């Protein structure tokens, strides 16, 4: 008998870059690239996981959370 697939709603975050990575440490620039952000006012929808939250916290002065779904 086949198992039923249960629909698990994954939480997501919409993150927007609001600060420039120019003259920032290389680690912060790479964190932005890891989040999929590299130009001002770009938005990305990311899965809400502890690792993503940690990356957002590391560059919190350069990004903002627009929406939590």
Image (spheres, rainbow, N blue to C red):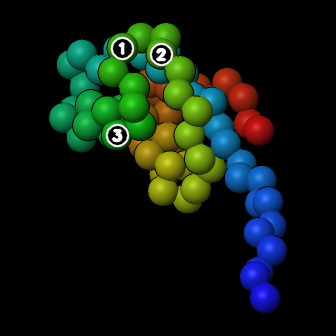
Give the answer, above or below, for where 37 lies relative to 26.
Answer: above
Dot 2 and dot 1 residues touching (CB under 8 Å): yes
The first of marks 3 and 2 along the sequence is: 3
Residue situated furthest top in the rendering: 40
10 Å neighbourhood of mark 1: few (<14), some, or many (≥20)?
some
Residue furthest toward the bottom?
1
Q: In this view, does 55 lie above or below 43?
A: below
Judge by depth and name the residue closer to the eye, 34 or 27: 34
Residue placed under numbered mark 3 in the picture: 34
Q: How crowded is mark 3: few (under 14 residues within 10 Å), some or many (20 or more)?
A: few
Q: Marks 3 and 2, Cα distance to the nearest angstrom?
A: 13 Å
Residue 63 image offset from top left, x and y in percent = 50, 26
Residue at x 56%, y 40% (from the top left corner): 46
Callout 3: helix, strand or loop?
helix
Q: Residue 50 placed where, x, y %? A: 55, 59
Q: Residue at x 71, y 48 (%)?
A: 11
Few, some or many residues within 10 Å of mark 2 (<14, 14–19, 20+): few
The residue at which mark 2 appears reads as 42
Tell me if label 1 and label 3 are in contact, CB under 8 Å.
Answer: no
Q: Which residue is drawn at 62% across and 49% down?
A: 48
- Mark 1 sits on what residue? 39
Horizontal side of 11 relative to 43 (left or right) equals right
- Where residue 40 sits: x, y (%)? 41, 11
Secondary element at image label 1: loop
- Res. 28 visible in picture: no
Instruction: Estimate the spatial distance between the alpha carbons at disc 2 and disc 1, rounded to whole Å.
Output: 6 Å
Spatial CA distance of label 1 from label 3 is 13 Å
Decide: marks 3, 2 in contact (CB < 8 A)?
no
């Amino acid at each position: 008998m086949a198992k039923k697939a249960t629909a698990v709603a994954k939480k997501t975050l919409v993150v927007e870059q609001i600060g420039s990575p120019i003259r920032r440490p290389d680690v912060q620039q790479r964190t932005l690239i890891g989040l999929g952000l590299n130009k001002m006012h770009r938005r990305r929808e990311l899965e809400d996981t502890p690792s993503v939250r940690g990356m957002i916290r590391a560059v919190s002065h350069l990004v903002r959370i627009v929406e939590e779904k």
